Amino acid sequence: MSGGQAETAAGKTLSNVASLSSVDSLSKVRSQLPQLANAEGRVADWILQHPDKVIHLSMAQIADECAVSDTTVLRFCRSAGFRGFMDLKLSIARDLAKPTQTIHDAITEDDDVATIVRKVFMANMQALTDTLEVMDTRALAQAVDLLAGAKFILIIGVGTSAPIVQDMYNKLFRLGLSCRAQTDSYLQLMEVALVGPGDVVVGISQSGASNDPVLTMEEARRNGASTVVITGNAQSPITKHADVTLLSVSNETRAEVIASRIAQITIIDALYVALSLQNVEQTIRNERRIWDAILPKTI
C-alpha cells in the first residue's frame, strides 16, 4: 500500500470511529424534555445550553448550577437513558470531541512522530504545572503527619488506578511503614472492615466517582480510620469521605486520562520524600538493607 493509500485508509478509519459513536447524547436529552419533571427539566435545559461545561464539572457542581440536588441530576441522567452521570459525561465528551481526541487531546491526523512526542511531553508537563499551582501544601503536610503516625495504612484503588496504588505501596513499605495495597474491589471492602482509629486508608481514584473506592472510603470513615484521597476531581463523591484531599489536574477529553496519572505519581513522590526526611537515618538504613538484599539478583 502506498503512502497516499495509507493516509486515505487512516482517514476513513477515523471517520468510521466518529460515525460509530452512540446516538447523539444531546439529542437523547432533547427527546426526553417533554416528559421530565420540573427539576429534571432544569438540568436538561442547562446541559443543552452548556454541553462543553458538562465535561469538566462534577455532578455536585452541575446540581449547584441548576439549583437542584445531586440526586435530581442522577435521576435526570437515568430518565434520559444514561446509566449514570459518568455515562452522560463521557457520551457528551465523545460527541464534542474530534476523533483523534479519543487518543490524545493535542494531536491531529497530520502530526508526525516528532510532533506527537513533543505534544505528549508538553501535555504531561502542563499537568504537573497545573497540579503544583492548585496544590494545598497544608493538606499535603497533614497527609504526611497522618501517614507517619498511622498504626496501619491501607492503599486502595481499582482499574487503571491499580498501578498507582502499587507505586505508593512500593514507596511506603521501604520506609518501614506498616502498609498494604489492595486493588480487588471485594477484598478492599473486606480489609477496610477491619481498620479502626489510628489506621489510615488512602483512596486513589482519578474520577472520584467509581463506586467501589467510594464505598471503601465510606466504610473506612465509618470504622474510625483517617482517610486520604488522591483524585482528579475535587467535587467528586469520594472526597465526601476524605479527611485530606490531594488534587491532580489535567485538561483531557478522553475517557482514560494520561497526564493526570503522572501528576498523581508525582504527588506520591512528594509524600515519600517528605516522609523520608522525618527519619533520614532510618530511611538510609532501610534503603541499604533493601539494596543488599536485591544485589545478588543483579548481573
Image (cartoon, rainbow, N blue to C red):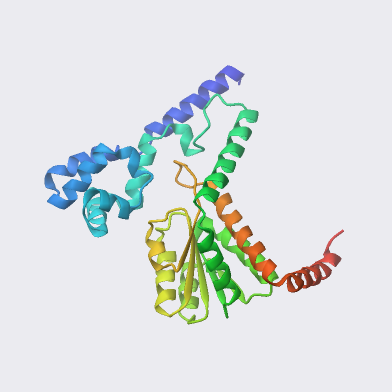
Please state which of residues 201 and 89 is positioned toward the viewer in this rendering.
201
**Which residue: 23% across, 58% down?**
69
Which of the image's four quarters has the C terminus?
bottom right
Q: Position of residue 164 (x, y in %)?
A: 58, 59
Q: Is residue 2 above or below residue 197?
A: above
Residue 17 is left or right of residue 289, and the answer is left
Please state which of residues 226 and 29 is positioned toward the viewer in this rendering.
226
Residue 231 is left or right of residue 180, and the answer is left
**Which residue: 18% across, 44% down?**
32
- Farthest front residue? 138
Q: How many marks?
A: 0
Residue 298 is left or right of residue 116, and the answer is right
Please state which of residues 79 and 62 is positioned toward the viewer in this rendering.
62
* Residue 23 in view: no
Q: Position of residue 70 (x, y in %)?
A: 27, 58
**Which residue: 41% across, 65% down?**
214
Please state which of residues 39 and 157 is positioned toward the viewer in this rendering.
39
Which of the image's four quarters has the N terminus?
top right
* Residue 224 in view: yes
Q: Position of residue 47 (x, y in %)?
A: 26, 42
Residue 266, image quadrant: bottom right
Q: Position of residue 15 (x, y in %)?
A: 43, 28
Q: Is residue 14 above or below residue 67?
A: above
Q: Is residue 130 above or below residue 242?
A: above
